[in-house]
Amino acid sequence: MKRLILALAASAILAACSSTPTKEQEGAAVEDRSGASASSQQQQKPQTQPTGPTSKPLESSSMSGNPLKDPANILSKRSIYFELDSNVVKEEFKPVVAAHARYLQQNRAVKMTVQGNADERGSREYNLALGQRRADAVKQAMMLLGAQSDQIETVSFGEEKPKATGHDEASWYENRRADLAYPND
Amino acid sequence: MLKIHKLLIVLALAMLPQWAAAQLRIEVIGGGATQIPVAIVPFRAEEGLPQRLTTVVAADLMRSGLFRMVDPGGMNPVPYEPEQVNYGQWRARGADAVVIGSVTKAADGRYDIRFRVMDTAKQTQIAGYVYFATESQLRLTAHKIADVIYEKLTGDTGVFATRITYVVRRGRNYELHVADADGFGAQSVLSSSEPIISPAWSPDGTRLAYVSFEQKKPVVYVQSLVTGARHAVAAFRGSNSAPAWSPDGKRLAVTLTRDGGSQLFLINADGSGAPVRLTQSSAIDTEANFSPDGQSILFTSDRGGGPQIYRIPVSGGAAQRVTFEGTYNVSPRHSPDGKSFTFIQRNGGRFNVAVQDFATRQVQVLTEGGIHESPSFAPNGKIILYATEVGGRGILAAVSSDGRIKQRFTADVGDAREPAWSPVVNK
């Protein structure tokens, strides 16, 4: 049953991936136009550019030029939120997962960590395992989209590092989360 | 006859880093069905000690909820020796037992502490011991005296001379504390800017295993309370958590995700060798706890849907589900006699401490209406220590295994959580 759900989720992501690149590339093209003049001054350029329209960092004196940190780049989106007792990557987060998978595919030397989290209710150790399951689900999806297993370590913080500290559903939702972390974050 | 009991106090605590830590105050709610009336006469010359022994003894016994203190004042002469005990008068005051004793300074500078427990009905001595203690061992000696009284009058092992460990969070700082079972003498044995969870005592009480996030992921460490030395024993790719000691102290059951999913493994407690996988499921298997005979392990698994408690032989094989009431049963811990286990059961939005008997499968829910976590038995099986919240702050609490007596431990500052009760050592 779980495998079936995972397989369905994965195929949904694949479907989303094949249907959404136009949108994302449009976004990238916007960045390209605004950032073109400053790109040569950037210290750290992305090692590889996606095929098709190339994306470059947005012009800004404070910006490092790292697409992972460019607020206008989808790669700067690092959090995937989950429903209660669920490790299914929801539709709205599939573009984020797909973008990071593609980044890893195009940057084979890059290694990163998916950090799973859980809300505060219940056993700390069981919540640690629930967070791990969410991290693993994100990794599975990224592997189906071209990332390699050894590029991604999945770990869990359980309920220990809440983003929101309230004790209501809004906070709990914030905390049922997987974060994508790169070494130089 | 006076039994001479030389106390060899190899006090690990004395060697711990002397970091100041907040004290815990304990508040008792409820009491035993019957409370044994005891008179504790201040020991001869104890007023000269930096710590009055009988004050600590009486506080221990009162906190258990199983004793009622009978006023020891106004006797003439004040009894310090058996022949000075007027049994008729003590019986008239309603005391079943009278505790008497004396303190003298020995030639080597230590204190010679003698005490006797006298039965007022039989007019006989039911216990008598001599302790030699240094000034720093006075509280421990008082706890040992309370243990003897508790044991002689209730028939159960006393746990006053044991310790507890727990995690305190203050803002972004996490500390692992070790305190006496009465909350005194709390010391920080580890301080970190990253979370610490799941401390577990080695069976000999000299080491703690715990999970630290200092490497930006959960890693299992073992730390000596004698030397303070610590080392990672499970730091594999992925998450490493939920350490549980085997009764011989040689192995740990841990939850590792290195093969994918959260699964139980056995590792050597010194971190040597390769982990041996114990469970083989596509579900979550975690929160292992060894049976006292070391033959089987209880754990939490959601292989059937929601989290339930299962049992598996240490040698591996098929796991058997043991909880069936409710949709969320987690955090199992065996009772010291191995006949039952405590765990957390969710009812609606509440998480309560429960006990289930292995033979009858009967479940008794011991707490109500709370968010209760991490239950662990006192080494005599009579008290269950757990974590809860009051006013948004984490505190420790305890409930007697019959549910009648509740205690609340409040720390001066910070959130207290993840408690575990030490084994009985130096007995």
Image (cartoon, coloured by chain):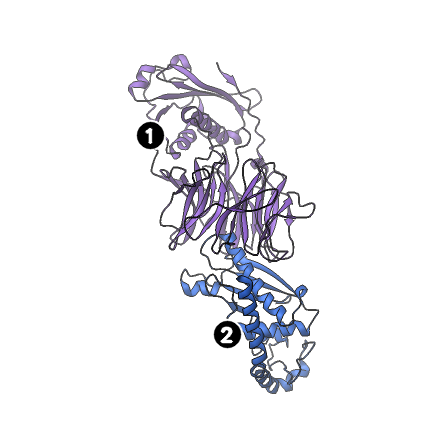
Q: Residue A16, percent across and down? A: 55, 77
Outermost residue, top side? B83
Q: Which of B104 and B63 is in front in this view?
A: B63
Q: Mark 1 lies on which chain?
A: B
Residue B403 to residue A150: above or below: above
The C terminus of chain B, quarter of image: top right
Q: As shown in the figure, which amino acid type bears the numbered disc 1?
A: Thr
State the blue chain. A
- The disc labelled 2 sits on which kind of residue? Glu
Does residue B188 sit above or below B11 in this rendering? below
Relative horizontal placement of residue B33, taking residue B380 as reference (left or right): left
CA separation in Å, label 1 and label 2: 62 Å
Of circles 1 and 2, the one toward us is 2
Indicate the position of residue A126 as horizontal and vertical percent values. 51, 53
For mark 2, what is the residue?
Answer: A92
Question: Picture quarter containing residue B283?
Answer: bottom right
Above or below residue A36? Residue A139 is above
Task: Please state if A102 lies on the left or on the right of A117 as rendered.
Answer: right
Q: Is mark 2 on a helix, strand or loop?
A: helix
Q: Is residue B197 visible?
A: yes
Judged left or right of residue A43, residue B49 is: left
Give me the disc on residue B90: none
Q: In the structure shown, which secondary structural element does the residue marked by tag 1 occupy?
A: loop
- In the picture shown, does residue A171 fall above or below B385? below
Dot 1 surroundings within 10 Å: few (below 14), some, or many (20 or more)? few
Q: Chain B is drawn in which colour?
A: purple
Chain of the residue under the numbered disc 2 shown in the image: A
Label 1 belongs to which residue? Answer: B34
**At 55% across and 75% down in the image, what residue appears?**
A95
- Where residue B420 appears, x then y in whole percent? 50, 42
